[in-house]
Image: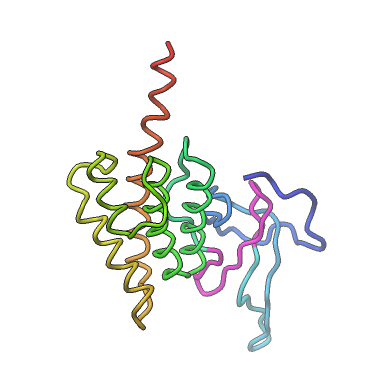
Amino acid sequence: MQKLQGIWNQSKVGVSNYSFNCGFCGAYAGPSYGYHCTYEKNREVRRSGQILLCPSCNRPTFIAEKEQTPGILIGAKLEHLPTDIEQLYDEARKCISFGANTSAVLSCRKLLMNVSVTKGAAESKSFAFYVNFLEENHFMPPDSKDWVDHIRKKGNEATHEIPNISQDDAEELIKFTEILLRFVYEMPGKMKKHLKV
């Protein structure tokens, strides 16, 4: 992620000794600059929240009562992904960091469909068609059909049922999606440099 240019007006130096994982760039940050939200109680000034500026990307993170927004990005940054797949994967990761778990699960489901199409499947087919395509063409890691079926079920829940998707479910599905993307794109992409020798 490119560093945000400029300086934050009236930010204070030495705002915190608190370290955090930046929800924008993923860096483990110990900020030097930021802002405090303070109040007075019993003649003592107290902090109720703070905005910390990441020294790596210069973006703000809000922290109050041990809750961070945006939250930590779940899933690793991957290499060798097609642009559309990378954008959708990053979107799913960002959804979780903001607590939009239902949206993250729907993005994971859409990712499976898009992966199938990038590997040669026809467009405008059913989700089951895409799952079968991935399996029949060996684009899924061994013994992962149950995981893909789990994404299907959670995607159906997110689309057709009233209860929201939990944070744990969303994080679990992102982690499986990461494994699938590594298997389909990242590992073959890394191997190409060795095959050129």
Residue 127 placement (x, y as % from top left): 32, 59
Residue 176 placement (x, y as % from top left): 31, 52
Residue that appears at 50% across and 46% down: 86
The quadrant the C terminus occupies is top left
Residue found farthest to the left: 143
Residue nearest the viewer, comparing 188 with 10: 188
Q: Is residue 105 above or below residue 24?
A: below
* Left or right: 20, with 136 as reference point: right
Magenta span contains residue 61: yes
Magenta span contains residue 190: no
Q: Is residue 11 above or below residue 118?
A: below
* Left or right: 11, with 183 as reference point: right
The quadrant the N terminus occupies is top right
Residue that appears at 49% across and 63% down: 97
Residue 115 placement (x, y as % from top left): 39, 47
Q: Which residues are magenta?
A: 52-70
Residue that appears at 38% across and 53% down: 113
Residue that appears at 43% across and 14% down: 196
Residue found farthest to the bottom: 42
Residue nearest the viewer, comparing 38 with 53: 53
Image quadrant in which you'd find residue 163: bottom left
